[in-house]
Image: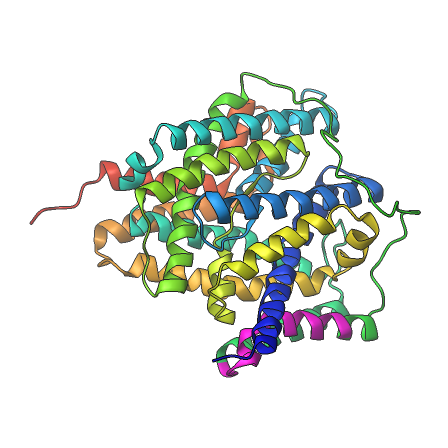
Amino acid sequence: MKEPNQSFLGATLETTQWFVFLLASSVALPIVIGSIFDLSFTQVSGLMQRTFFVVGITSFLQGMFGHKLPIMEGPAGLWISIFAVMAYSGAQPGKSYIETLQTLEAAMILTGVFLLVFGVFRLAHRVLFVFTPLVTGAFLFLLTVQLSGTFLQGMLGIQQQVEAIHVDQTAVAFVTFCTVLGLSVFAKGWLKSYAVLIGISVGWLLYIGWVGSTNESGGESSFISAPDWLAWGTPHFEWGIVPLAFITAVILLSNIVASVVAVSHSIYGKPSYSYNQINQGSSFLGITHGISAMFSSIANVPLASSSGFIHLTGQKKKAPFLYASALLIIIAFFPSLVALISGIPSPVANAALLATFVQLMGLGISNIASETLDERRLTILCISFLLGIGLMFLPAEVFKGMPGIVQNLMSNGLLVGTVLVIIMEQLWKESKT
């Protein structure tokens, strides 16, 4: 039996590691959005504060009342793509970036309404038949491919319009990456359990010693301040975003299923979920989309990378996850602390996240390989991957002149690839012979 002090220390360290993982997963993408929409340092700091608050409250709500698993709710890779595409397509008719962000707020609200309807009326589980191992595996694979580019850019120090690779930042990033992976694979006991925390700590200290401080000065921050409500202004609804919102909501159902399957596999040793779990997850994902929009942040979704974190660290308890989520909510009310914590160097944070994606990509491949890869399945996968991944390499400018809805859908490789797998698997039925 464990001593009370040992139990308290273990819970504290587990909570700290979850907290660091929540932070590391939240820091990078607001910076990317700031770069895309040309936001000032003050605006990015505000977005960071709101992101921390929303990540904390949505993760806590889902863990307590939604799917009830320790799955981080974080900025969605799918929504990052939609933000990037609409930043360009919105500029075509002469919209300002702020007007485009107001339209995106409305798109998140509409998507949330669809997800809430799916969950409340118990429709979410009725489409589960389309989310076969091939679909969930393809989704996880495409997700890792899409975000690996963003994380690798961050590791190389070439985000925010800086095109040259920073050798010193890159070296620190790969030390962090190798430390996290090395400890998680070869270490045992507490070293393995706290691989992510140790890796980020080593990387951060090395970064400060070699590269220097990363903190920018944006003026005096108030000691305590609530996250801004509708910082981008009132949501602006347009009919053109309705189809986008519906399709995004359907794709996000596959995100829920993939995340629940991935995390349950890491916790219980086998993929499992219930209809009620998926419906509740959909309902609360709808609510959290509304929260994300009201606090002018990137819509949050269950991050399947949580399974990689759990697999790397062996931390399967839900309580430390809930404590870390609550702590993140509290921290968001202290802008000076947000500025300090968000000083985690981007190359270090991205390296730690990419390490967790190694396990996630492996899980995607395992899902795909769980069924015999006959000619039918291989053809479906190859067509979907070739077109989906190919679209990820195309600049948004190539869709210039097309209707806005076409730009928003066709320029999103993750969305197109996943939809293709679903459609082809349903239309091309498996031979009974």
- Residue drawn 32% across the image and 62% down it: 270
Which range is magenta?
186-205
Overall secondary structure of the magenta section: helix
Residue lying at the far right of the rendered structure: 219
Q: In the image, is residue 341 part of the stretch drawn in magenta?
A: no
Percent x, y for residue 101? Answer: 68, 29
Q: Nearer the viewer, residue 386 or 83?
A: 83
**Drawn side of residue 187 relative to residue 126, left or right:** right
**Does residue 423 sit above or below 176 in this rendering?**
above
**Does residue 176 sit above or below 323 in this rendering?**
below
**Drawn side of residue 286 relative to residue 433, left or right:** right
Q: Nearer the viewer, residue 367 or 122?
A: 122
**Drawn side of residue 362 relative to residue 227, left or right:** left
Q: Quadrant of residue 204?
A: bottom right
- Residue drawn 49% across the image and 78% down it: 185
Q: In the image, is residue 189 part of the stretch drawn in magenta?
A: yes
- Residue drawn 54% across the image and 52% down it: 72
Percent x, y for residue 328? Answer: 67, 52
- Residue drawn 24% across the image and 58% down it: 371
